[in-house]
Image: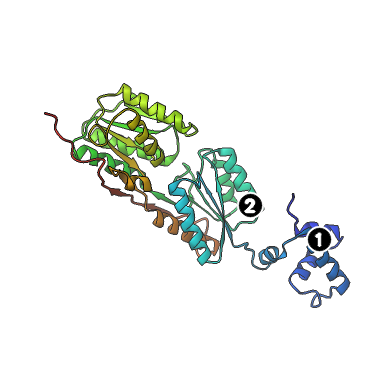
Amino acid sequence: MKKVSMKDIAKELNTSITTVSFVINGKSEEMGISPATEKKVRDLISKRGFNPNSAARILRTGKSHTIGLIVEDIGNYFFGNIAKIIEIEATKNGYNVFFSSTENNDDTAKQLINKMRNSSVDGYIITATPGLKDEIMKLKTDNVPFVLIDRLIPNIETNYVILDNYLGSYNLTKHLIDNGYSKIGFISILSEMSMMMEREKGFLNAMTIAGLPVSSKSMLKVQFEDTEETVIKAIKKYLQQHPDLDALFFATNYLGVMGIEALQKCGLKIPDDMAIVSFDDNDLFRLLTPSITVAAQPINDIATQSIELLLRVINKEQKQAKTEGRIIRPEIIIRDSSPKKKSKV
């Protein structure tokens, strides 16, 4: 059902939007609107189920006090916790949050931005999909407040809060190398997203500096859209094709979870047969035996800084044209899955 607007109410009564606005704001007598006209407006508002409160607030303040949060997957550990903290911080500041997931689909992301614009959100926090450049440029051109989180869009200056993915990946790889592992497999997704490219770059550079060879054949990349079953089968096949590997680096936590299952299906024990590390933490990694070494994203910092930066732009404490970027350092949490390698007798 189409959402009823103030324009619809005015059109049906053959009156002006201004008249409807004055009635909604309780200014009928002050503005010389007759009791009969006021009654007609209020009766139609009630009949059509129009919510005048939000409309009146937008008219008075120019703000809806709502924020659009568009992330890859609200069910994901990282994004779910980001959303929770953003909602808490937004509520403290008198804002509501609309949540939506893109599943990394460009068309879905574009539709969500348009729907939220039609709902008059005051600003956005967006995890951009690879093909969202035109929509982000339009938001920027139209001076719509927004902040990008988790990943950037190349060649566009925006407000953003991201993780230093390169540093986290480099340090995680170096941890394995320092503990004696030299044949390290890298498992990621096929993606041109900035954070995934930086994670791969950090891994490769750490290996190169240590003088350890890496070829494209020694890395596995799966499709983001692949089912869990498909990914597990791909990792199993990869392990069978590379029996000399002594460690695995999973570029995302969900790949890490699937990878652990693949290792179990192959009869390989962690860390006796294979050390593993994962980029991004997960409750499961902490609770498993052995627990899993990770590069953890400071979720609280990312969430609070993104909502704080957005509200500064919305409240005109910072000009939208004057962009600000914040890069947060990940934390390497060393657990039981990557001990010093035992020399084989």
Residue 35, x across and y down, in percent = 86, 74
Residue 155, x across and y down, in percent = 47, 42
| Element carrying mark 1 | helix
Would you say 52 lies left or right of 304 here?
right
Question: In the image, what residue type sits under mark 2?
Answer: Arg
**Tag of residue 236:** none
The reply to whether the C-beta atoms of the residues labelled 2 and 1 are less than 8 Å apart is no
The residue depicted at 75 percent of the width and 69 percent of the height is: 24
Q: Is residue 216 visible?
A: no
Residue 336, x across and y down, in percent = 25, 44
Q: Residue furthest bottom?
A: 30
Say whether disc 2 or disc 1 marks the residue closer to the N-terminus: 1
Instruction: Name which quarter of the figure residue 255 lies in.
Output: top left
Distance in Å between CA atoms under marks 2 and 1: 26 Å
The relative height of residue 250 versus residue 241 in the rendered view (above or below) is below
| Element carrying mark 2 | helix
Q: Residue furthest top?
A: 241
Name the colour scheme: rainbow
Question: In the image, what residue type sits under mark 1?
Answer: Lys
The residue that disc 2 covers is: 117
> Which quadrant of the rendered structure holds the C terminus?
top left
The relative height of residue 47 versus residue 236 in the rendered view (above or below) is below
The residue that disc 1 covers is: 47
Would you say 33 lies left or right of 207 here?
right
Callout 1: 10 Å neighbours few (<14), some, many (20+)? few
Instruction: Name which quarter of the figure residue 122 lies in.
Output: bottom right
